[in-house]
Image: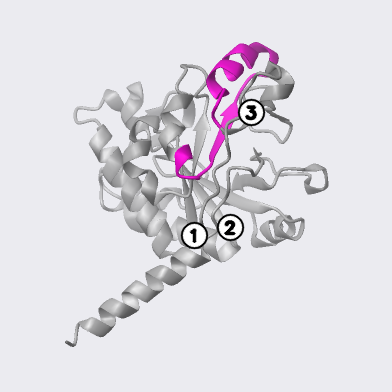
Amino acid sequence: MKFIFPAILASLLLSDNAEARWKPTQSMTWNIAFGGFDINKESADIIEVDYGKSAETIKEYHNHGKKVICYFSGGTIEEGRPDYNKFTAVSGLVRNKYSAWPKERWLDYRVDGIKPLLIARMKEAVSKGCDAIDVDNVDGYQVSDVKSWSNPLTKNDAIKFTTWLGMTAHELGISIGLKNCLDIIDIVGEHFEFAVNEGCIRRDECYWYKNFLSTGKPVLGITYNGLSSNLKALCRNLDGLPISMIIKPGSSLVQESVYFDGKKYCGSSFNSGKFILLIQ
């Protein structure tokens, strides 16, 4: 009998967190820029920035009616981050360089010592007023740098890690998006409010999000290197899928972007997909 009250209390706390968390919808537009935004020129409903932005800046974005996603990497550590030395102090956590980004090193997220470090980052995002977090580089199991390890990360490791990320974010009362990892979205999607994808059009992979989209949760997509060079792939991949896609002019996450309108760019026969209302 004495265990009933704590169990009820825990259930109520989880329910309160679920109700308090922001849940984006498929009809919302978005943009991402790590250098920051000229907020007076931004029309998107959702903006994504680095979690290092100040609470004052995030408040300014809120004052302009924006929802704010805060970004950090959970699968790599970047040189220059204030907590860099805390990561390197954990035995076995920090591994080889990320060949595409030489100032980043891969993390073996199977090492338990990573958990308090990422919880601290999540708490910082919560304290600054971020509406959600986007945790990057959780797909290391797909990358040659990590595959070169003697005991590389596996898909199952990613499932365990991303499930932990989702559940932990929810315990802290903040929404979270799954970055890339299309091949596990159907397994772990229940733990995430939205998904963020870079370049699903390159390998004709956007259809992997069909089941996730059918639940009413949004997918926020990024395509790099301009509209004209990607137009055929965009029209082919997004037909019938209500993915909120932005196109950047180059490979950098600057504010400038084009919001993809399928009927405008692909023709009147393009099917933008049916928005599914997410029950709050």
Where residue 97 sits in the image (x, y, percent)? 39, 29
Binning the other alpha carbons within 10 Å of mark 1 as few (below 14), some (14 to 19) or many (20 upward) gives many
Task: Please report the residue visible at 57 percent of the width from the left and 15 percent of the height from the top.
Answer: 233
Q: Toward the viewer: 181 or 51? A: 181
Q: Earlier in the sequence, mark 2 or mark 3?
A: 2
Using residue 144 as the reference point, say whether residue 218 is left or right of it: right
Mark 3, residue position: 252
Looking at the picture, which amino acid does disc 2 mark?
Cys
> In this orientation, does residue 153 appear?
no
Mark 1, residue position: 174
Which numbered marker is on residue 203? Answer: none
Classify mark 3: helix, strand or loop. loop
Write down the region rendered in magenta.
Answer: 213-241
Mark 2 vs mark 3: give the one in front: 2
Give the vertical position of 31 relative to 59 (above or below): above
Mark 2, residue position: 130
Q: Magenta includes 188?
A: no
Where residue 223 sits in the image (x, y, percent)? 59, 25
> In this orientation, does residue 56 appear?
yes
Task: Please report the residue visible at 57 percent of the width from the left and 22 percent of the height from the top.
Answer: 239
Mark 3 vs mark 1: give the one in front: 1
Task: Please report the residue visible at 45 percent of the width from the left and 64 percent of the height from the top.
Answer: 18
Query: What separation in Å lies between label 2 and label 3 (alpha carbons)?
Result: 23 Å
Classify mark 2: helix, strand or loop. loop
Disc 2 to disc 1: CB gap under 8 Å: yes
Q: Toward the viewer: 75 or 135? A: 135
Classify mark 1: helix, strand or loop. loop
